[in-house]
Image (cartoon, rainbow, N blue to C red):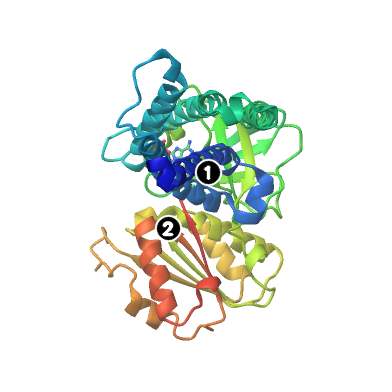
Amino acid sequence: MWYKFGAAKISLRAGKMLGMAAGLLILLQLPLAGRLKSLDRIFSLPGLIRQHRWHAWAIVLMALIHPLCVLLAEGKMMIPLEMRYWPEWVGVGLLAVLLVQFACTQWRRPLKIAFHHWLTGHRITGLMIAALLIVHVLYVSETFTDNPPPRLAVLAAAGVFTLFWLWVRSAGLRNRRRPFTVTRVENIGRECTCVEVAPEQGISMAYLPGQFAFVSFTGQHLSREPHPFTLASTPSRPGVIQFAIRHCGDWTRQVDGLAIGDRAYLQGPFGCFSHLLHTSPQQELIMIAGGIGITPMLSMLRFMADHGDPRPITLIWSNRSREHLVFTEAFEHLTAKLTGLRRVPIFTQHTDGGKPSERLNRKMLETLLGGCSRKSAVFLCGPPSMMTTLATDLKALGFSARSVITEAFGF
Ligand SMILES: Cc1cc2nc3c(=O)[nH]c(=O)nc-3n(C[C@H](O)[C@H](O)[C@H](O)COP(=O)(O)OP(=O)(O)OC[C@H]3O[C@@H](n4cnc5c(N)ncnc54)[C@H](O)[C@@H]3O)c2cc1C
């Protein structure tokens, strides 16, 4: 009856379409999260990771509705426990792994899963999902079991995915061809280490000021998992690459145990957070940094100082206290070289008896940016909560959404 009235047919077709869409989207996740430079240049890696997150919601939603539609069309409440239904049960397994992976990603912090454990689990479950998906699609429907062209298309997609996965996972090996040596490890500011590396074979990494790279070290106490850090140095001085690493987790807290002579490997550069990509040469700049979010600004300012850039620049840098400041000398030097630079330090927690100022808010911005052109490009980098509020405040103060460029220090 269902079938005659057409509802079952529609339900079955809708179920299949949703399943196919979810499957395709699953395979697409690898290029999104695979740190591809070609895609980074267009969308920027943080933007791709955001897309990857949104896709997860769509995939889970479609993967949940897909079996409901198919079961409804067949008038069943459940998949029978019979051998011939094994491909459907593979689908159930796939859905279970997908839901576990999704829950661990969305609720990693409340579940108290350490980032590096989560990342390893995410990679393993991602591979399991792809393998289960291919088996499920190949054997669940006569469309693929009996028709060579669609079957070949699925096998080709599986082949391309496998090759691509191998290529992405071998990035570490490829980076080994261009080793760097740690040349400086020094504690600067509070809970922050400055690490400098120099290319071993004289071939440094070409990058734009403000970009970041994934860095791994061969230090004894550190895991080799690459972590993302902004290159605080300037490409106009390619002999040395500098990172300022704030101690905030298990890995960064051990970074001061690095020794001179340890090896470093860099994967990158990535990101589009650079004045060279977003501004015209004379355009006024506003830079707003929270804490260690100063690193991309420092790189851009160093680059501009080396090129004698005369444009007006307002740098607002919010820190908890004076002790949290880093590169104080470098900033003095930059102020002397960059005639258009105006620095506005803000301390939200004075420890030397001074009065703490408020956190940066709309009223303060209105005063501080009163004399700035609304056509300025605004670079914003800091803790996620600060960035969300300030981006809204800047729009309310007359800066267009397009002129506010943001970088979050976390994916
Ligand atoms: C684009 C970008 C630029 C950054 N630049 C700087 C910088 O110049 N200076 C600085 O001090 N910090 C920077 N960070 C933050 C820095 O990457 C993290 O603080 C660091 O990785 C934390 O590692 P952890 O194991 O000590 O802490 P955890 O507590 O394990 O991680 C804290 C957070 O760091 C991120 N993270 C940790 N490990 C990885 C990883 N292997 N791959 C990707 N993300 C990871 C995750 O968002 C995680 O939630 C940047 C982050 C990004 C995304």
User: What label sits on residue 406 in the rendered view?
Assistant: none
Find ligand 1 in the image and state its quadrant.
top left
Badge 1 density bin: few <14, some 14–19, many ≥20, Cα 10 Å: some
**Above or below for 394 versus 8:** below
- Residue 73 in view here: yes
Disc 2 element: strand
Q: Where residue 366 appears, x then y in whole percent? A: 39, 81
**Above or below for 251 versus 291:** above
Q: Earlier in the sequence, mark 2 or mark 1?
A: 1
Quick check: 226 left or right of 62? right
Quick check: 24 left or right of 208? left
Amino acid type shown at disc 1: Ala
Read off the residue under disc 2.
382
Read off the residue under disc 1.
21
Q: Where residue 405 appears, x then y in whole percent? A: 53, 65
Amino acid type shown at disc 2: Gly
Q: Nearer the viewer, residue 60 or 378?
A: 60
Disc 1 element: helix
Quick check: 61 left or right of 130? left
Q: Nearer the viewer, residue 345 or 381?
A: 381
Identify which residue is drawn at 52% across, 83% down.
374
Q: Nearer the viewer, residue 18 or 302?
A: 18
Identify which residue is drawn at 66% across, 76% down.
310
Q: Nearer the viewer, residue 111 or 144?
A: 144
* Quarter of the N terminus within the rendering: top left
Q: Where residue 335 appears, x then y in whole percent? A: 56, 69
Q: Where residue 173 appears, x then y in whole percent? A: 66, 25
The reply to whether discs 2 and 1 touch (Cβ–Cβ < 8 Å) is: no
- Residue 260 in view here: no
**Above or below for 139 versus 238:** above
- Measure the C-alpha gap from mark 2 to mark 1: 36 Å
Q: Quadrant of residue 333?
A: bottom right
